[in-house]
Image (spheres, rainbow, N blue to C red):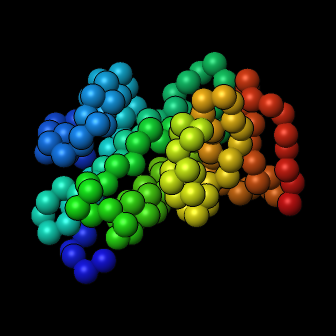
Amino acid sequence: MTSSIEIKESKKKDLLDFLLFAGEFKSFIENLINSIPIERLFILSAYCNNSIAGILISEDKSQNIDSLETLIPTARLHLIQVNQLYQNKGLGTTLLKEYLKKQQFRGIATINIKIPRNYKKGKEFLLNNGFRQKSRDNAFILFKYNLWNDFGIRDSVLIGEPSHYFLD
């Protein structure tokens, strides 16, 4: 990518510029950011030559007290969206890698994302960036990225998920 890229953490109010080009995702993004409590919302924005080019929205799920997510800090990635003008130039990958670094620094152990089962481009993107498919149903596929690799355990299972443990 030849343009100057800047990735920075954003707030809800910073999304107004992004919503101008969000297209069919506009109402989804608006509903998403209004449904997640502000203290659990994490937004990264990508700027190319001072213009917003992409966005990533996630939620800190480690505040849940009714499951092992409290012991194993987890985040849920809800959306990675890149403006059409900047697609297929590596910006989504750059945004995701910066997000993973920031989450690891914050002590998050696992990142989950659920995508529509027929979203082949999204599935390929996640697999190419180190996510592993954990489960699928008729409508969705759940992917997981582990940031922790302690004591030979390379996977974690939360209450309500099928029990499968893998040891190195």
Q: Identify the residue at the far bottom of this view.
A: 2
Instruction: Identify the residue at image location x=75%, y=48%.
Output: 155
Res 20 visible: yes
Q: Position of residue 63 (x, y in %)?
A: 51, 28
Instruction: Identify the residue at image location x=57%, y=57%.
Output: 124
111 vs 45, left or right, is right
Taking depth in this image into account, of 71 and 121 the one nearest to the observer is 121
Taking depth in this image into account, of 23 and 3 the one nearest to the observer is 23
Instruction: Identify the residue at image location x=29%, y=37%.
Output: 24
The quarter holding residue 13 reads: top left
Q: How many marks?
A: 0
The quarter holding residue 85 reads: bottom left
The quarter holding residue 18 reads: top left
Q: In this view, does 117 lie above or below 84?
A: above
Quarter of the figure that contains the N terminus: bottom left
Res 70 visible: no
Q: Where is residue 166 in the image (x, y as percent from the top left)?
A: 85, 50
Q: Where is residue 43 in the image (x, y as percent from the top left)?
A: 32, 44
Q: Is residue 97 above or below residue 146?
A: below
Q: Where is residue 136 in the image (x, y as percent from the top left)?
A: 69, 35
Instruction: Identify the residue at image location x=44%, y=58%.
Output: 96
106 vs 44, left or right, is right
55 vs 133, left or right, is left
Quarter of the figure that contains the C terminus: bottom right
